[in-house]
Amino acid sequence: MRPLHVALLGTSHVHFRDYHDLLARDPRVSAVVLPAAPDTGDRPAFGAASVREALRCADAAVITSTTAQHAQLLPHTVRAGVPTLVEKPLAATAGQTARLLPPPTAGGPTTTAMFLRCAPGLRRVRELLRQDVLGPLTAVRLGFAHTGLTDGVFTGEAAWMLDPAHGAAGALSDLGIHLIDLLLWLAPRRPLDVLDAQLRHRPGLPVEPAGTALLRWGGVPVTLHASWIGPRTGFTAHFAGRHGTVQVAGGSVTLRTGRTGTTWRHEPPQARAVLTAFLRQLGGRPAWQPPDHADIRRTASLLEEIAGVARHRR
């Protein structure tokens, strides 16, 4: 069996190294990397010929460039007809997202790297909610944080993450997008509305390093918090219902109903897990439910609404 040829387009995203190392360790995969410096504004970072060359024999593409470069790269993967995994967000605005999504009839499927859908602990949470073990939900809190800003993660090629000209929009967009997508995945038919939002500003920084949003999820209040400055790091969640609670901390899931409690230990959510799932899906082994175009558009619209509410609040 010949190896699976994957074109890794762009090296600027913070998860590029995770993906590159995973592909390099997999003997079933042959990867070609197309590097590029972030956009300069006066010249394209990728030459059309080099993109076509990278995609010439590709079975799939993974885009790990700046957000602004997605508009340059994605049309090539669509024309090549290859399944494509794009790092989130697809674009900086809801309008750009809608324009960039290929039509349903175009080539291979395109999706975004929403890795919380791949976390075993959150798959367990989804099943618990489907079984209605908590009864009617009364409140939800979701948090996603790391100390990337203070730890120097956004330096070198990743410095674009602090520059809106390259598609950067701050921590609530960068991490909160995963939390919104998680809600869409947990209950696809449940309405989701924005009630309030607040961004934390830092002098001299063009994007916000932390933010909080209050949503209504089918009548249930949901608080989202995202931060690049800690203090706690990792993923956390709390689902409260009439009959009990589910608490998530990293990969640990604790169900409490009445006087009883059960804890399951799983690996914490990992960004690279979405690439593993994507590759397995290519091999005919369904491993996850990727965001569809409706999910991607809806998430982009909600993020834009959150940003607008936060700006109005200032």
Image: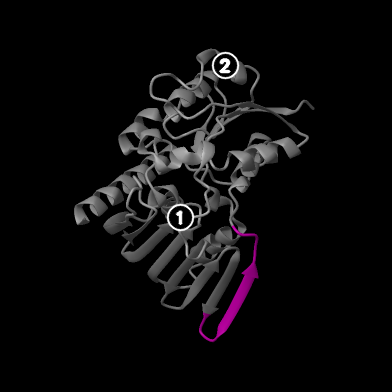
Q: Quadrant of the C terminus?
A: bottom left
Q: Is residue 155 above or below residue 309?
A: above
Residue on which the image places disc 1: 228
- Horizontally, residue 160 falls left or right of residue 30, namely left
Q: Is residue 42 above or below residue 68?
A: above
**14 or 109: nearer the viewer:** 14
Which residue occupies the extreme front position in the image? 204
Q: Can residue 98 be seen in the rendering of this structure?
A: yes
Q: Position of residue 296 (x, y in %)?
A: 41, 41
Secondary structure of residue under mark 2: helix
Residue on which the image places disc 2: 50
Q: Is residue 161 above or below residue 198?
A: above
Q: Position of residue 10 (x, y in %)?
A: 55, 30
Badge 1 amino acid: Trp
Check if residue 231 falls in the magenta segment: no
Q: Which residues are magenta?
A: 257-268
- Horizontally, residue 74 falls left or right of residue 223, namely right
Task: Identify the mark nearer the N-term, 1 or 2.
Answer: 2
Q: Can residue 102 be seen in the rendering of this structure?
A: no
Badge 2 amino acid: Ser
Q: Position of residue 228 (x, y in %)?
A: 45, 55
**46 or 102: nearer the viewer:** 46
